[in-house]
Each structure stands twice: as structure tokens, then as C-alpha cells.
Image (tube, helix red, strand yellow):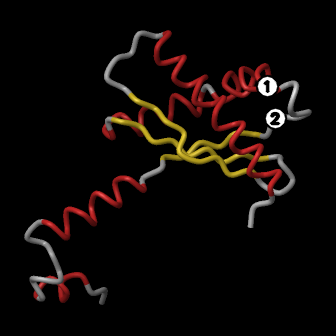
Amino acid sequence: METNRQKKIGSLLQNDLVDILQGEVRKNGITNLIISVSKVNVTTDLSIAKVYLSIFPNEKAPELLNAIKTNTPLIKHDLAQRVKQQLRRVPNLMFYIDDSLEYIEKIDRALTDKENPIENRDLLEKRKKS
């Protein structure tokens, strides 16, 4: 269970990280790419922030995640400049891909296409784990 302080710091970091990442995309002239920070979870001791990114198009996600991870010290420095009035210490950033939208889309496709297990009972046998 997150405390109010963790939630406040998470939302503060989320807003500033969106600005930093979108600013880098714009500054480098990259088109057809959207990066959004879907959630930031901060540990109870405020030392680590897990940042979940949604990247569109999905094909570029692994490559972009690696680029972001290699530039984490620069991103943390930019973040520290922005939040220096609110936080004494900026948490270490750990970036992850948020695949919840893909998961929802996969379920939606399964329910609307031929692979609907409710209408086609034969699919249930295929989906059971041995």
C-alpha cells in the first residue's frame, strides 16, 4: 500500500519525466513517436522509482527502452534540476515497458474475433495448461 507521500512524489516525478522525455523527442526531431509515463511507483524509503513507459508504435519500444536506460544518469540530472525545490534527493530511476494496453487489446481481439472462447468451446482445450 502506497502512502500519500509516495503517491505525491510519484505524480511529481511522472509529470516532470513526461516533460523531459517528450522534450527530448521534440528536440531531436523524431516524428511518429509517442512516449508517455503511465505510472511511477516509489519505494517506501524513496530511494527507487519504477517508471512505466507506454511507447507508440510498439515496435520501437525495446530499442527506445535501451536508449532511455543508457541515458538514465542524464535524465536523473534533468529531473533533479526540476524538483530540487521539492525533494532533497532524487530517487534512482528504473524504466520498464508498460504493456497493459497490449494486454487489453489482446483480450478485446480474442473476444471479438474467431478466437472467442465463449462462442467456440474447442479453444478452451487449447488454452488449458498441461
In this picture, residue 122 sits left or right of residue 38 = left
Q: Residue at x 37, y 26 (%)?
A: 33
Number of dots carrying numbers: 2
Q: Position of residue 23 (x, y in %)?
A: 54, 17
Q: Nearer the viewer, residue 110 or 64?
A: 110
Residue occupying the point 35% across, 60% down: 103
Please state, as top left, top right, bottom left or bottom right, where the C terminus lies in the image. Answer: bottom left
Q: Residues within 10 Å of mark 2 (few under 14, many from 20)?
A: many
Location of mark 1 (residue): 80
Residue 117: % across, % down: 17, 81
| SS assignment at label 1 | helix
**What is the x, y in percent for residue 64?**
45, 31
Q: Earlier in the sequence, mark 2 or mark 1?
A: 1
Tell me the element at label 2: loop
Q: Tell me residue 11's x, y (percent).
A: 68, 42
Query: On the rendered structure, is 41 left or right of 6?
Result: left
The residue closer to the viewer here, 16 or 72, is 16
Residue 12, above or below 42: above
Crowdedness of circle 1 by 10 Å Cα count: few (<14), some, many (20+)?
Answer: some
Q: Residue at x 40, y 30 (%)?
A: 34
Tag 2–tag 1 contact (CB < 8 Å):
yes
The alpha-carbon separation of the residues under discs 2 and 1 comes to 6 Å
For the N terminus, which image quadrant? bottom right
User: Quadrant of residue 112 in the image?
Assistant: bottom left
Residue named by callout 2: 90
Which amino acid type is marked by label 2?
Val
Q: Quick check: 10 above or below 43? A: above
